[in-house]
Amino acid sequence: MSISRIGVKAMGDFEGRIWDAEHECMPRPQLEALQLQRLQQTVRRVYDNVPCYQNKFKEVGLVPEDIRTLDDVAKLPFTVKEDLRLNYPYGMFAVPMREVVRIHSSSGTTGKPTVVGYSRNDLQIWSELAGRFMTAAGVTADDIVHIAFGYGLFTGAFGLHYGAERIGASVIPISSGNTEKQLMIMQDYRSSALVCTPSYALTLADRMEKLGISSDSLSLRFGLFGGEPWSEEMRREIETRLGIIATDNFGLSEVMGPGVAGECLHRCGMHIFEDHFLPEIIDPETGEVLPRGSVGELVITSLSKEAFPVIRYRTRDITRLHYDTCECGRTIVRMEKTRGRSDDMLIIKGVNVFPTQIEEVLFQVEGCEPHYQLIVDRAGTMDTLEVQVEVNENIFFDEMKKQRAFVDMVEKRLLSTLGVGAKVKLVEPSSMPRHEGKAKRVIDKRKL
């Protein structure tokens, strides 16, 4: 992987740093004993205080005393986003409102938002866990952390903000938008760690090129990116253009926010902080727990949340878990980059397609810009997939014959990777909308 600014030698100065070695490097028998203790406490908490869970447990004939081993977690019912919506706004809280010191929620773009709450202790744990993954990603007390996530009800900005402060770094809470001002602040304030979505990182890189700003004029060393799935090809693109080491992190507001998992500088999977979260991989269709090493949907049970604990929350994220010890020394499980979401997964002519698969192909084609959109439609009874991709000026304004050959080449690569055909449409440079937050990659026009 590209580590163009710091270099391999300098990276070694950071890779061995662990924020909480006691829990991040805990022997597995000791870790599992702690997990069981906390699981039993959490099950008792929700059974006693959350009517939704009381009803769910009664429906399957369970009481808290039935949870005697970690394997018994499979007996517990799932929690899904609809449960949160049906109990909007505070029905899933396990403490009185006087003990809730923070409220966050989702955007609610598809209906009522999902509302989550935090006790004072929850916020302390959140900042600790964010501090863990930020330390793993190379951030230290000497860094100046540039947070370009939107502040507000979204959990992303606040999670990393307090995590950075917890480890003693300086924080620039610039929020999202105003890209040229972002770059000015980055230069003048000597930002050394960038926090945003990977899509926005590329938007910053695009604007730098237009303004003639070299990555050498920045002090950036690290990029901590989350909020959307992104490919290894996209990582390499960001690293090359911004001159940084880019790491992935994972979180979701229903479970806590950022701080559930994050990569170390070896970047061989995101470390899940298992002393606070119990992960499982299930078959997204049947709900059955899959053997270790299987690819499936990630399910998470919170083990220490007071205000808003969740039992077997279906994240809809598709991934795989690795239980071997990482080179960094952490013994906690690692999750692979998410391959997409089971509810974002496209089924085209019976074939499962993830946008990240398409992204991998496009980023390998010289001339394709890192901006694309997928248009899914139906012609009669047949699904159609159109991939609209920006290309550089040399390709877009080339003679028709060469342009057609370029399109044919991309379409063949997509067919080989996806197993289903896609029509490629080239669009001129800078014609697609740039995103300050999550990129909207898919427009599904089918009436399914």
Image: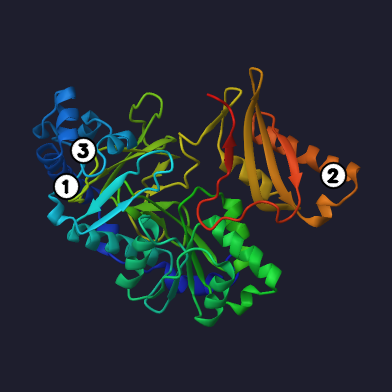
Relative vertical location of residue 95 with respect to residue 23 in this rendering, above or below: above
Q: Which residue is mark 2?
A: 403
Q: Nearer the viewer, residue 156 or 246?
A: 156
Relative vertical location of residue 360 with respect to residue 288 in this rendering, above or below: below
Q: Amino acid at mark 1?
A: Arg
Count residues near mark 3 (Cα–Cα under 10 Å), then give few for <14, some for 14-19, many for 20+: some
User: Is 278 positioned to the left or the right of 419 in the image?
Assistant: left
- Check whether the beta carbons of the residues at disc 1 and disc 3 lie within 8 A of each other: no
What is the C-alpha distance between the residues marked 1 and 3? 10 Å
What is the C-alpha distance between the residues marked 3 and 2? 58 Å
Q: Secondary structure at mark 3?
A: helix
| Point 20% across, 59% down: residue | 101
**Residue ranking furthest to the top:** 381
Q: Which mark is residue 70?
A: 3
Relative vertical location of residue 305 with respect to residue 384 in this rendering, above or below: below
Of mark 3 and mark 2, the one earlier in the sequence is 3
Q: Which residue is mark 1?
A: 38
Count residues near mark 1 (Cα–Cα under 10 Å), then give few for <14, some for 14-19, many for 20+: many
Q: Secondary structure at mark 1?
A: helix
The answer to which image quadrant residue 351 occupies is: top right
Q: Amino acid at mark 2?
A: Gln
Q: Amino acid at mark 3?
A: Leu
Q: Secondary structure at mark 2?
A: helix
| Point 65% across, 63% down: residue | 206
Count residues near mark 2 (Cα–Cα under 10 Å), then give few for <14, some for 14-19, many for 20+: some
